[in-house]
Amino acid sequence: MLNTSSAVLPPPIVLDPLLQSWLQEDIGRGDRTTQALIPSAETGTAQWIVKEPGIVAGLPIAARVFRLLDPNIQFESRGTEGQRCNRGETIATITGSFAALLTGERVALNLTMRLSGIATATSRYVDKIADLSAQLVDTRKTTPGLRILEKYAAQVGGARNHRMGLDDGVMIKDNHIAAAGGIRQAIEQIRTRIPYPLTIEVETETLAQVEEALQHGADIIMLDNMPPDQMRQAVQKIRSTSNRIKIEASGNVTLETIRSVAETGVDFISSSAPITRSTWLDISMRLKQGIPDSSQA
């Protein structure tokens, strides 16, 4: 199992409005099929079965979906977040009203399959550099409305979170540099206008830009789309100047290239790929018992 101690779920006051809105989207004016078929008092049990190997993420969120529909639902996870599972493995057993099980099925499964897919993809990248000091971090390339959960899934997969939003930190990118007229101008203007605890990160593409960022007190220097040899030179230049400055590498990081990037000595490697290029983990729900046939009574 992965080390998921840093993966923190949003509290109910944040999570519940999201889940309620997604349930409302799916339910609309009512679950026509379930309401017409099943007496509200009928209860039963369902199992969630994984149809391919992967890393499970999102089970506490799925449990919350069902409990918003029926507070008495019993959701029993077989294992913990970040657990590796095999094809055919049962990862959860859910007991409660058939109405809640069937009405919440799609939203709960969609979220868990999406988040498990991200956790699975992230773990592959993390595994490639597990014996090196560099850490994988995610990006803001997320699905609108799902960022807080997609970044949670990246944590479950073993990555660290980068900025959650624009208010989390200062990142001076190429277009900011162009707008300000240079790295020096951008740093000087921003430093006088931001709250004290925030750090300043500067995106660089050349060794000359790295030198300018160093001269003007950047706290974090990003090496963007640099070839490994140039990145290694940049790391040496930064390390010879200060051990305080953190170094991040970014740009077209793949499973094939992430290890060579990590070997240059950077502290962090940011990549959107574990989120943007992940596929859903296939999970299905199966009822263990059916509804009694009232015509036979």
Image: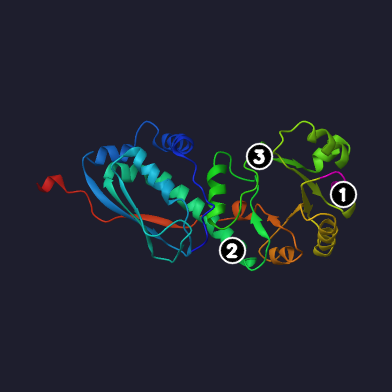
Amino acid type of the residue tagged 3 in the rendering: Asp
Q: Residue at x 73, y 42 (%)?
A: 199
Give the Cα separation between the discs numbered 3 and 1: 24 Å
Instruction: Choose top left, top right, bottom left or bottom right for residue 72.
Output: top left
Q: What are the residue bounds of the magenta stretch?
A: 209-217
Q: Is residue 143 left or right of residue 263?
A: left
| Disc 3 + disc 1, Cβ < 8 Å | no
Q: Is residue 215 magenta?
A: yes
Q: Which residue is tagged 2?
A: 124
Considering only order in the chain, which callout, 3 or 2, is on the residue closer to the N terminus?
A: 2
Does residue 189 appear to the left or right of 289 in the view shown? right
Q: Amino acid at mark 2?
A: Arg
* SS at mark 3 in the image: loop
- Residue hosting label 3: 168
Residue matched to label 1: 209
Furthest residue toward bottom: 131
> Label 3 crowding class (10 Å Cα cut-off): few <14, some 14-19, many 20+?
few
Residue type, label 1:
Gln
Q: Secondary structure at mark 2?
A: helix
Q: Nearer the viewer, residue 31 or 187?
A: 187
- Of badges 2 and 3, nearer the viewer stands 3
Q: CA distance from mark 2 to mark 3?
A: 27 Å
The image shows residue 260 at horizontal and vertical percentages of 73, 66
In three-dimensional space, the C-alpha distance between marks 1 and 2, rounded to whole angstroms, equals 32 Å
